[in-house]
């Protein structure tokens, strides 16, 4: 199973999707008729038999894909970052399901960066080095004993409890607070007034008010489908508001010409492949640059662990998921716009890239850039943001300082975060 | 957003919704062939009216839906009709009766008739296509092609899987164009956009193929979860439609 | 050693091409055809004015003929041209495009004509002349179909003009665009495992 649920579905309707693997294995009709509803019940999609799979939410699609894979009761299951685009709540449910499967005796191979979620599930650990060779394999405890230092050095994410035990200290606070005093709020850089948007009559963002000051760091959180990406695109003028107004540095971004818009703001898309145009990494990050910006390319790429001499001539489509994300971000960070809107900027990064990225974002903030990042990653929210904006069903559910948000049960619930998500944060980030 | 038409359960239980998709396809193709045989305005007018009436009565398509789908075709019918009328060779024949004149352009009676009937042909073909699309389910059509018409199974279901990419690809296209804009690149219909879309299409195909192989697609003989049969009513439907076509063609005098 | 590699080379050339379709081949052809359909559809919506042209939009025919050349150029197997055109055509039928049914017929003709050309070269040659021939065959089939269905009343002058237009497009534009697209896809590295 892959991280993108949409691309592994093959049939039009939910029940046919589940039956597909059974048909291929020549199950008799009677057995299929018994198994399909059962498989759907197991993943909580009973009653959606006749729905179109393309009309399901991302989380439901991912569960449907799992049901399709599980229906014929395979002996082994391989999953590549399956909770990638799921909100913490959905991801939790998904992993719970894996727990059940494991208790039922199924062999599961899970490829995952999110240590906090995945480790409790694992019996054995296989760690790969950056050159693709095996670092170590074996029971979780034994590997941690043997390779503690190496794991830390290789930039592997570890559950914070293990990490603090290994380093014998609190993990370094990655929080961006030191040295980052919010600029004195003058007139806001961006202000949105009763902003609304609908796709084909279905509302996605409803009546949102938001102000962003220069140099501010905001995280946009909310469940799958709550409208984060849509709001982000509205803020930078990629979508035209159905109602309400956005003013960015005194202008309406939607009306700006591409060149002017690119000078003012940047947007990092949720799926990095959707923003690639050119055949090589070097051409890709240089596309659309203005004179004077070109000399920033080399140092930035080196800082992101993508030095041009090694990556410049490669095709952006032939990079790992984490590398692609950094290339797509590099293309935006180079412009140093006054507003950066980033959709899941740290997803799929190992610890080392995560920290490099965070450092870069901080540099940008120091020059006065405001950052709005949509994310499902509690860690990024705690590390980067001074303010958290919660969306629920397209409407604003909360807008408060990070500290308060982490203590605010109602707001966290609206965002799909459990208190366990907060407990798993490194101690230094916890309220 | 584009995507296949949603058929609700109600429209699937109507006489047209129940008919074999293959039978409807056969009727549509036969009528299409018949329409190409005549340049008289009567048969296309009759067949268009019949197609729409059966869509409304036998397929219970809501009037609003049908009108909404057909509305843009008015213009298309006009363009085809007028262009055929204007560039007809009959206009150059001085012996033909002149119905109108625009500068040096002359419009003769046979040319106007040809224009009218070809405009109606557009309406008839569009009505057929619309009624077919609004009463036919893609999965059922594929099932029928495989189980009744015996088309190669891997290709048919491969194609059906590819259609599931439609909403995704149309979002990809929008996002690609937005990505150009935010990066200061002009021209949202630049060839680079088509290329990038094709790249995403190949990636999507690769992932889908792996997912299908992992689920034993094409490994051996398959069984069927949905059973499609050819029923006697389907044969009757085709026979009637051939008779209707013959009757419609008989009204033509040209 | 030199001779050995030479012998291996000719052997490889004479070996019948692998005609079995993998799932990946099927999906790549089908999804590419769908992507062309989506692009064209969105383009049509963006340029509302074109819609009024209706079937005469076929003046932009080159675009519809592209899948019949691009797909076989990537997946060099029997049936690629026909399959690609049929998928692209039935997409419009399923999406409810109004000439869906007629597009199906013209897709069959266009794909079939290109297919015949590739078959005539035993699915082994994909050189520029072969691509041009396939595009011409496909355009000819499209022209005959459209003439009979959409403009039977046209004067021969007008028909000649249309034929000329489509001929030029098939002779130059379509093969050039197909080669450029497939070359760029190859360079992007997404066509690994397909014949170069
Ligand atoms: N291009 C589109 N066309 C139609 N509907 C869309 C489109 N993009 C998003 N939607 C719908 O709009 C709603 C909001 O989507 P959006 O992508 O903004 O949510 P999100 O909060 O970013 O979700 P996620 O956490 O899964 O990324 C969802 O119901 C979604 O299905
Ligand atoms: N299609 C490809 N062609 C060539 N090289 C590739 C291709 N895909 C990935 N690579 C390279 O192979 C290496 C391993 O890639 P892979 O995708 O397996 O990494 P990964 O461990 O899954 O990384 P991530 O955690 O970022 O997803 C990377 O250095 C990447 O640049
Ligand atoms: Mg999103
Ligand atoms: Mg990976």
Image (cartoon, helix red, strand yellow):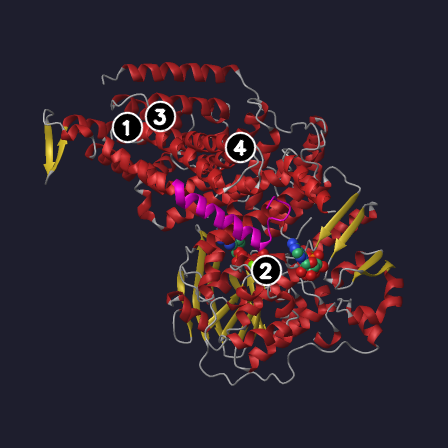
Q: What element carries label 3?
A: helix
Front disc: 3 or 2:
2
Nearer to us in this view, A402 or C73: C73
Question: Does the magenta segment cover residue C183?
Answer: yes
Please give the residue where the numbered disc 3 appears in the rendered image: B53
Residue C43 spot, x, y in % from top left? 40, 49
Residue C103 spot, x, y in % from top left? 41, 33
Q: Is A255 situated above or below A273?
A: below
Front disc: 3 or 1:
1
Q: Do the residues labelled 1 and 2 touch (CB within 8 Å)?
A: no
- Mark 1: few, some, or many residues within 10 Å (few <14, many ≥20)? many
Query: Disc 1: which chain?
Result: C
Please give the residue where the numbered disc 4 appears in the rendered image: C121
In the image, which disc is placed on residue C152?
1
Q: Is A236 situated above or below B123?
A: below
Q: Are marks 4 and 3 in contact (CB under 8 Å)?
A: no
Residue A128 spot, x, y in % from top left? 78, 61
Please give the residue where the numbered disc 2 appears in the rendered image: A316
Respond whether the residues carrying marks 4 and 2 are from the same subunit.
Answer: no
Q: Do the residues labelled 3 and 1 touch (CB within 8 Å)?
A: no
Query: Disc 2: which chain?
Result: A
Query: Disc 4: which chain?
Result: C
For the question of whether residue A8 can be seen, the reply is: no
* Start-end of magenta stretch: C170-196
Q: Earlier in the sequence, mark 4 or mark 1?
A: 4
Query: Disc 3: which chain?
Result: B
Residue C118 spot, x, y in % from top left? 51, 33
Front disc: 4 or 3:
4
Main SS of the magenta part reads helix
- Mark 2: few, some, or many residues within 10 Å (few <14, many ≥20)? many
């Amino acid at each position: 199973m892959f991280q993108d649920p949409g691309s592994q579905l093959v049939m039009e309707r939910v029940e046919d999707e589940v039956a597909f693997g059974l048909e291929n294995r020549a199950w008799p009709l009677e057995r299929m008729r018994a198994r399909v509803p059962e498989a759907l019940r197991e993943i909580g999609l009973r009653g959606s038999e006749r729905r179109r799979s393309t009309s399901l939410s991302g989380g439901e699609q991912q569960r449907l894909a799992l049901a399709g894979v599980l229906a014929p009761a395979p002996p082994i299951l391989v999953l590549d970052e399956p909770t990638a685009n799921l909100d913490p709540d959905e991801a939790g449910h998904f992993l719970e399901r894996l727990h059940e499967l494991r208790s039922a005796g199924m062999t599961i191979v899970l490829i995952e960066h999110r240590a906090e979620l995945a480790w409790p599930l694992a019996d054995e650990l296989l760690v790969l080095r950056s050159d693709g060779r095996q670092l170590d394999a074996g029971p979780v405890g034994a590997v941690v004993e043997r390779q503690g230092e190496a794991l830390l050095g290789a930039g592997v994410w570890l559950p914070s409890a293990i990490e603090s035990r290994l380093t014998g200290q609190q993990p370094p606070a990655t929080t961006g607070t030191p040295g980052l005093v919010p600029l004195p709020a003058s007139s806001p850089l961006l202000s949105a007034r009763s902003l609304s948007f609908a796709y084909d009559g279905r509302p996605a963002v409803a009546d949102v008010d938001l102000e962003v000051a220069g140099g501010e760091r905001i995280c946009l959180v909310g469940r799958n489908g709550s409208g984060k990406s849509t709001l982000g695109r509205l803020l930078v003028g990629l979508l035209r508001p159905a109602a309400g107004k956005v003013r960015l540095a005194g202008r309406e971004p939607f009306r700006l010409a591409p060149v002017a818009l690119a000078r003012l703001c940047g947007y990092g898309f949720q799926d990095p492949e959707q923003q690639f145009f050119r055949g090589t990494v070097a051409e890709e990050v240089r596309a659309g640059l203005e004179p004077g910006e070109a000399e920033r390319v080399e140092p930035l790429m080196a800082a992101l662990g993508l030095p041009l001499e090694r990556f410049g001539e490669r095709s952006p489509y032939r990079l790992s998921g984490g590398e692609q994300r950094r290339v797509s971000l590099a293309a935006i960070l180079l412009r140093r716009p006054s507003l950066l809107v980033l959709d899941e900027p740290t997803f799929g990064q190992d610890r080392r890239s995560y920290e490099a990225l965070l450092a870069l974002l901080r540099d940008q903030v120091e020059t006065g850039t405001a950052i709005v990042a949509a994310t499902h990653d509690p860690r990024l929210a705690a590390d980067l943001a001074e303010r958290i904006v919660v969306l629920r069903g397209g409407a604003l559910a909360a807008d408060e300082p990070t500290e308060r948000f982490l203590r605010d049960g109602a707001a966290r619930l609206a965002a799909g975060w459990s208190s366990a998500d907060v407990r798993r944060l490194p101690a230094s980030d916890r309220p | 957003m584009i995507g296949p038409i949603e058929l609700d359960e109600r429209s699937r239980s109507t006489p047209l919704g129940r008919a074999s998709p293959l039978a409807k396809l056969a009727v549509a193709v036969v009528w299409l062939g018949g329409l190409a045989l005549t340049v008289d305005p009567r048969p296309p007018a009759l067949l268009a009216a019949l197609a729409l009436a059966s869509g409304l009565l036998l397929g219970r398509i809501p009037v609003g839906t049908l009108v909404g789908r057909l509305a843009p075709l008015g213009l298309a019918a006009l363009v085809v009709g007028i262009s055929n009328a204007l560039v007809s060779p009959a206009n150059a024949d001085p012996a033909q009766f002149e119905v109108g004149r625009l500068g040096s352009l002359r419009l003769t009676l046979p040319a106007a008739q040809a224009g009218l009937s070809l405009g109606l042909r557009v309406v008839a073909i569009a009505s057929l296509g619309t009624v077919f699309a609004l009463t036919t389910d893609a999965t059922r059509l594929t099932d029928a092609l495989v189980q009744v018409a015996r088309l190669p199974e891997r290709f048919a279901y491969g194609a059906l899987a590819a259609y599931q990419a439609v909403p995704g690809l149309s979002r990809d296209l929008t996002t690609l164009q937005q990505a150009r804009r935010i990066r200061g690149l002009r021209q949202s219909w630049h060839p680079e956009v088509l290329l990038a879309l094709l790249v995403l299409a190949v990636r999507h195909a690769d992932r889908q193929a792996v997912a299908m192989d992992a689920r034993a697609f094409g490994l051996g003989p398959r069984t069927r979860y949905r059973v499609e049969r050819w029923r006697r009513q389907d044969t009757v439907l085709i026979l009637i439609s051939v008779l209707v076509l013959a009757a419609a063609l008989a009204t033509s005098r040209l | 050693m030199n001779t050995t590699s030479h012998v291996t080379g000719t052997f490889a050339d004479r070996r019948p091409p692998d005609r079995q379709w993998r799932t990946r081949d099927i999906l790549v052809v089908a999804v590419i055809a769908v992507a062309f359909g989506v692009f064209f559809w969105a383009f049509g919506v963006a340029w509302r004015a074109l819609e009024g042209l209706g079937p005469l939009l076929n003046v932009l025919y080159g675009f519809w003929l592209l899948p019949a050349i691009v797909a076989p150029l990537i997946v060099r197997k029997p049936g690629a041209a026909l399959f690609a055109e049929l998928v692209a055509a039935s997409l419009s039928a399923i999406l409810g495009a109004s000439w869906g049914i007629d597009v199906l017929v013209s897709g069959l003709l266009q794909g079939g004509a290109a297919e015949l050309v590739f078959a005539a070269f035993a699915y082994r040659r994909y050189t520029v002349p072969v691509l041009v021939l396939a595009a011409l065959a496909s355009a000819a089939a499209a022209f005959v179909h459209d003439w009979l269905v959409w403009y039977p009343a046209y004067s021969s002058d007008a028909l000649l003009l249309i034929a000329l237009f489509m001929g030029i497009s098939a002779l130059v534009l379509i093969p050039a665009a197909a080669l450029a697209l497939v070359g760029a896809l190859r360079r992007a590295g997404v066509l690994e495992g397909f014949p170069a």
